[in-house]
Amino acid sequence: MNDEQLLRYSRQIMLPEIDARGQLRLAEATVLIIGLGGLGSPAAIYLAAAGVGHLILVDFDKVDLSNLQRQILHQTPDIGRLKVESARDHLLAINPDVKLTLINHAMEMEELLQQVVQADVVLDASDNFQTRFAINAACVQSKTPLVSGAAIRFEAQLSVFDLRSDASPCYRCLYGDSARIDETCTANGVIAPLLGIAGSIQAMEAMKLIMGIGQSLTGKLLLFDALAMEWHSARLPKDPACPVCGSATHARTSHPAKQTQTTDV
């Protein structure tokens, strides 16, 4: 690191759990963020500001007026622009050292897997279950840690699925086939700061995984109720009958090609 970088990241480097070694690990890391809406916005901002070296940003939506209440990567003049382009400008203004790869189209499963394999950590900041299931399948197949976040109305939930550990569940263990397609912000609404809280926690979990510090949310489901201002944590066990991670052989052969469609969070 040069003198300017040492100054930029000095408040992190002084933490004994991080030090220069941890900062270098961040600089050498690649994080794949799928979705640049309410969750992906704060996550991307904090990861770029904190010094993650390479962010792969995936979203093919354009900025809409209704996004601006919570999607803090984008501003009023960005309405009508591709979100990846708006995000690029915002993130480079924060930290010009970050390398950005922009993907502004829907990915079939093969391309999704290629991008997941490149990443040290994947952040699922999407808002539909077809996309979430496809991301999970790719992460299980490649054994890439997945940081999952979701927020709706006044509630948020977060977890980490890290199939580098045989004991870790996957996202499908949590939902199975019971996911409701109408459980989206578009259909139900969401309060703005809730996305900032959840997306920031996703960034924190990604950084911890990269640096190998602390305890991750693997095997836990973190729940937040903003109206009651209460946090709850529940154990999330692996489902031995899970069609995705229950059998390594099945996990490699049971995922037909899908498109990953991101929608607004």
Image: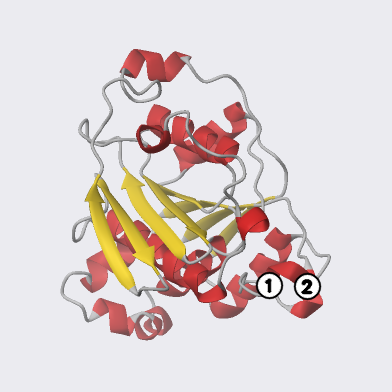
Decide: is 226 above or below 126: below
Q: Amino acid at mark 1?
A: His
Q: Which residue is mark 1?
A: 74
Q: Quadrant of the C terminus?
A: bottom right
Which residue is found at the position 35% from the left and 33% from the top? Answer: 173
Q: Quadrant of the N terminus?
A: bottom left
Going 50% across and 37% down the picture, which residue do you hit?
Answer: 179
Dots 2, 1 in contact, CB < 8 A: yes
- Give left or right: position of 171 versus 221: right
Q: Is residue 15 above or below residue 183?
A: below
| Residue 190 in picture, x, y percent from top left | 57, 66
For residue 240, the mark is: none
Instruction: Give above or below for 49 relative to 204.
Output: below
Mark 1 residue crowding within 10 angstroms, few (<14) / some (14–19) / many (20+):
many
Q: Nearer the viewer, residue 249 or 142?
A: 249
The percent coordinates of residue 73 (x first, y second) are 62, 71
User: Among all residues in the image, which is located at the extreme front?
Assistant: 228
Residue 170 position within the rendered picture, expressed as x and y whole percent measured from the top left = 35, 35
One can see residue 31 in this view: yes
Identity, as a three-letter code, of the amino acid under mark 2: Asp
Q: Secondary structure at mark 1?
A: loop
For mark 2, what is the residue?
78
Residue 60 position in % (x across, y down): 72, 50
The kind of secondary structure element at disc 2 is helix
Q: Which residue: 55% across, 79% down?
A: 94
Q: Is residue 27 visible?
A: no
Q: Quadrant of residue 207?
A: bottom left
Quarter occupied by residue 231: bottom left
Residue at 71% from the left image edge and 61% from the top image edge: 83
